[in-house]
Amino acid sequence: MKNRAGRVALAVVFAAAMVGQGSAAAELSEAQQRGRQIYFEGVSPRGTEIMAVVGDEAALLPGSTMPCSSCHGSDGLGRPEGGVIPLDIRWTELVKTYGHVHHDGRRHPAFDDDSFIRSMIAGIDPADNPLDRSMPMYQMSGEDMADLVAYMKMLEYDLDPGVGDEAVRVATLLPLSGRAGETGDAMRQVLDGYFNEINEQGGVFGRRVELLTVPAGESAESSLATLRDAFDSEGIFALVGAYTVGLDDELLTFLRSDNVPMVGPFTLDPGDAFFDAAAFYLYAGLDQQARVLADRAVADGAAPGKVMIVGPDGGRAAGLVDAVRDQLRKQDREHPPAVEAYASGGFEAAALARSVAASDTEAVIFLGEQAEFDALVRELANQSPVPRIYLLSSLISRPMADLPAVFDQRVFLAYPTLSSDITPRGRQEYQQLANTYSWPSEHIQAQLAALAAAKLFVEGLRKAGRDLSRVRLVEGLESLYGFETGVTPPLSYGPNRRIGARGAHVMVVDLANKTYKPVGKGWFDVQ
């Protein structure tokens, strides 16, 4: 990336010495930059037409539907898929003087510029053997083809920012002052300590992980501006364990522009509009937790048509209402749940309680605030029987020990993670690291999230292999299934799955013993 004029100075914290560690990305000529766009997008920067000729019937498709990178990857190595093994098309491989012998017995001498162009437009190798029919042929102008050849010679050197032979440079965005400053500093210490442990063990494929801590600003705008300056000036490969509370959507928009991976951000709610981004979350957001509550209400005996969804009208709550309603419809499309939405500041507990009684509601999924919930249970306590009530723990600000006695075993809460997720081995590892690096005794949940994010990133690096790129990191993370961090539920990802622990714990309030008890097996996946 080019440095931005007038960039601000950054208050940064390094996990390792950065002296002499510049970005490894190659500087591309104008022709190579145009060729890069053709390789990755199948679109000509000159505005001329590029078409792909596909299959035995020579179907013509826009080049954008089958760019070179879709089969050969960002590094030219190719990924086996569907029984097809794309060739390694790095230029140093193509021009090997002794030529090539392929797995199917096909032989040919080394490529040069002319024979490479013939392979692209006629589908033949330097010995005039036909290429595999899975390889499209392309129709494009001579100028575009020359640009593509120019880029092909630089492809293997066109590394993503932050990737060097000896180190990979990552960043985190954390509040280091203000109300959340202590939380951010605790997370920084955990990330620093864990990456230092990895580096002491030789790194990942010989690369150290070097961490740049970018301090969050007083607003989402100032935080993103500082982060942009860091990416533009420092060469950052990925964002790891960032504190994204209050700026998830804005941050994702920024990261999408360069396909920057974000691994294990610490957030209250990732929302549900992130599947087109390379963002890998640890825990379920409110949407999925609410869906678990919907499933639980039915499993506990409520008919979907006897469930009432209660929440504020508009904003994030409206999306949660829709999620619960959609989840209940999966089980009974003929009898939809009732919905009671109220305007901000317009909650009327007595009227709502009368509506519950009149409709014989068996379960209430409540998505409002603590004070509203308190007023509702006082009104409902006069009914018999009282309905079961299902809540999102993050919307409730205090313990439930003083609920009316009639609600014993009838109030349920969803949690994205609990202390029971920590395995004995995970607890031992955390304690050893905490002792070694003098981690603080406060903000434990944030520390565990930072540790899980760091471990998830390192596992992604291992899966990506020595030839590291952002695309390979994403592919490595997408391949993880049941990955044990030791401090979270097992994490699983995929091309269409960006939440590792896709579900929630459900706890019931036990008033007699003044405690919460797990319901059934405790953890429930979203169905």
Image (spheres, rainbow, N blue to C red):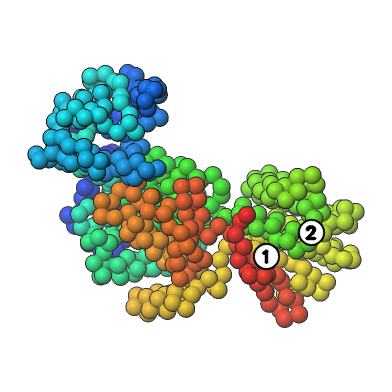
CA separation in Å, label 2 and label 1 = 16 Å
Which residue lies at the image location 76% right of the left edge and 80% below the top edge?
A: 512
**Disc 2 or disc 1, which is closer to the eye?**
2
Image vertical order of residue 71 relative to residue 22, above or below: above
- For the C terminus, the quadrant is bottom right
- State the residue at coordinates (20%, 57%): 166
Q: Which residue appears farthest toward the left when viewing the image?
A: 97
Identity, as a three-letter code, of the amino acid under mark 2: Ala
> Where is residue 516 shown, x and y percent of the image?
67, 74
Could one spot residue 47 in this view of the protein? no
In the rendering, which numbered label is found on residue 302? 2
Q: Nearer the viewer, residue 197 or 122?
A: 122
Q: Which amino acid type corresponds to the residue marked 1 in the rendered image?
A: Leu
Secondary structure type for disc 1: strand
Residue 195 in which image quadrant: bottom left
10 Å crowding of disc 1: few (<14), some (14-19), many (20+):
many
Q: Which residue is mark 1?
A: 413
Q: Pick the residue in front: 98 or 262.
A: 98
Q: Earlier in the sequence, mark 2 or mark 1?
A: 2
492 with respect to 164 (left or right): right
Who's the residue at 80% across and 55% down the image? 303
Q: The residue tagged with tag 2: helix, strand or loop?
A: loop
Q: Quadrant of residue 398?
A: bottom right
**Residue beneath the point at 25% across and 70% down:** 200
Q: Quadrant of the N terminus?
A: top left
Residue 320 percent location from the top left of the image: 66, 50
Residue 50: quadrant of the picture: top left
Classify 10 Å Cα crowding around label 2: few (below 14), some (14-19), many (20 and above): some
The outermost residue toward the front is: 105
Direction from residue 496 to residue 127 in the image, left or right: left
